Amino acid sequence: MFLSWEILKILKDFIKNRVSYKSSALILTKQDNKIIFPEVEKHPTLHEYNTIPTPEQLYKELINIDLSREEKETILKELSKLDRDHNILVMAYAIGTFLMDIIPYQTTPYLILYGHSNCGKTITANLFNFFTIQSDRTTTTQIMRTAQGYGCGYFVLDEPKTLNNDVIQLLKDLATKKKYIKTYGKTGQKYIFKVGGIISANSIYEIKTKNTDDLNAFFRRNIVIKINENDSIRNIDQTINYLQDNKNELIKLFIDYLTEQDPQELINKYESTNTDEKQYKFIIFSLEMLKELFNKYGIEFLTDTRINNIINRLKETEKEFQQDILKDEDIITMMEQIIYNDLLRIASIKDREPEKLNDLTTLNKYSEILYKQHGYTIYYMKDKKRIAINKTGQQKLIKILNKEYGTNYPEQTTQKYLMDKLTEKGINAEITQKRISNIQKSIKPKCLFIEIPYNYDLMEYKDIINIMIVIADMNGGIIGIKEIKEHAKKRGIKEIQINDCINALKHYEIIKEIEKDIYEVNIKELEKATETQENEPEQQDTPAEKPKNNTEKVINTIRTLKNIFGNDLIDFESIKEQIQDMTEEEIQDELDKLKYIGDIDQPRPNKYRII
């Protein structure tokens, strides 16, 4: 007989005049307005447990642990030494996921820890987890077989290399459904489990999703923190060893604390958490519960201000993670390389020379052919390069970007999604109808157009341009490449620099080819190209503007100290020493304002940094 976690029922022991409870899963659940930790006994229709120890064995180990108040205080004092943001998030996440069958969470997000190594990401995560999955290419079968028999808590996914679309879908289901149920094979045995997950990695892994909706769903159902070198803790090995040796005692301490709570009060507390963002509602509630646990034992560990700072950091990391996960920082350069490689395949042997491929006339000659063959192209306008991509071409580009350049764009990325991502980077992109190339008779399709400002620094070619000016003056505004090369060789100027200079001047229409290797020159514009600011009067140093108010005074002081201390946290005493005309209370008020508006945060008591 089993306690109802769908398949569970109450077992009444009338002989001992008490009620005992059994469950097919290791779980904290609610019964008679109490939170209980029922005995685990596998139901015959469930698939075998695969973890070691099994949920049954782990229950027996935990239930036999009876900690005194003094022992709990000792454990919590050691735990409080892990005081970095990601350590605290793991502790809170453990509490939140232990209550998954009690609290009607709108979503149970997975926690993602990534970034700087040797900061204790995985070590802390493994203090509270029930099992760990270590696999380069994680599968749903691995997760199902390992999670079987757990109705609360979380697993750790350590250093994954790839998360495929099936795993993403399973994680989504775990975040949103009351429990995950799947029937196995002809025997009809079931997997039934509900756990959270912590994904720990030093670097970004490959995400394989079919469409942008799946990728956005992945982003919406996680809380993520990017670890930096300031998150490391030194000289903590002894504490870590102690906590690892007492892992089950630590878990039992948390379970004891939660079974003392009134389930309805916890539900009310969760419901009253003031945020509309589901994933943050979960973690704010969990952080509040963690704060109350430490307070109960008189340990000052977590404050409301610290909780607010952690949540602000999570929200800042959220956008950065989305950019990091796509791995598309240099996407325009990647696209250009792909398109130029295809251009090489269709260009004539004569036009494949490097100086020719950089020439706008050559490039524009092939732009329409390239578009018709591949669905994408690149061409020059007067002051910009323009990439044009239709839907078919974008699918090809995405496959190449993902396979050869390691980006993580979904297979079925929409043009609007790509346009929005480019726009977020400050790139001028729009879906519209324009001509392919600057030739009047070229085709005019509707597709995604990306404009790239094309600015040559003509000062790089000052010596070559001075040679051109002399030759142009002597020849009535006409220059020949052969004569330029002869003079340039005497000055040690390489031929490739001359070709680059010619292309730049053609781009800005300062010179015009009238026959092979002979150019007509706009001498006035050519002379302007060599003008420098050397003869301009030097700007006089002006006294720095005085800060307009106390807030500016404080933030300017922190910026100055950052230049001195680098990435180290700036303590309150250092700030106070630099500001002699404000009281401590006034400085603290201004620091609180700066934290509120998001200019600074406070990772540790009386320690600040610019965000």
Image (cartoon, rainbow, N blue to C red):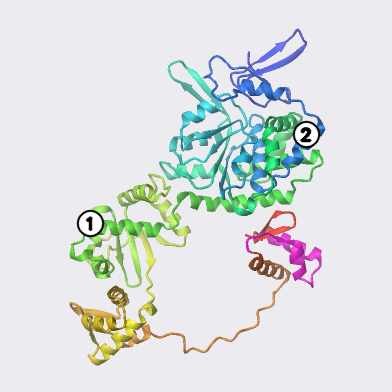
Which type of secondary structure does the marked residue at label 2 adopt?
Answer: helix
> Considering only vertical position in the picture, is 270 above or below 560?
above
Asked whether 590 falls inside the magenta stretch, the response is yes
What secondary structure prevails in the magenta region? helix
| Residue 412 picture location, percent across and down | 38, 45
Magenta stretch bounds: 566-594
Image quadrant assignment for residue 90:
top right
Q: Nearer the viewer, residue 58 or 236?
A: 236
Find residue 99 and name its label.
Answer: none
Magenta run includes residue 601: no
Q: Residue at x 38, y 77 (%)?
A: 460
Position of residue 550 relative to residue 525, above or below, is above
Q: How packed is label 2: few (under 14 Cα within 10 Å), some, or many (20 or more)? A: some
For marks 1 and 2 on the same chain, the one whose residue lies earlier in the sequence: 2
Pick whichever, 580 or 72, lies toward us.
72
Position of the C terminus by quadrant = bottom right
| Callout 1 crowding tier (Cα within 10 Å): few <14, some 14–19, many ≥20 | few
Q: Tell me the residue that label 2 is attached to.
A: 72
In front of the other: 128 or 210? 128
Quadrant for the N terminus in the image: top right
Residue type of the residue flagged with mark 2: Lys
Residue 445 showing in the rendered view: no
Q: Circle 1 sits on which residue?
A: 345
Please report the residue visible at 29 percent of the width from the left and 85 percent of the height from the top.
Answer: 468
325 to the left or right of 10 = left
Instruction: Please identify the quarter of the rendering in which residue 548 is found.
Output: bottom right
Residue kind at label 1, given as amino acid type = Arg
**How many numbered discs?**
2
Q: Picture quarter containing residue 442?
A: bottom left
Q: Position of residue 481 (x, y in %)?
A: 23, 80
**1 or 2: mark nearer the eye:** 2
Q: Is residue 441 or residue 377 the one in the foreground?
A: 377
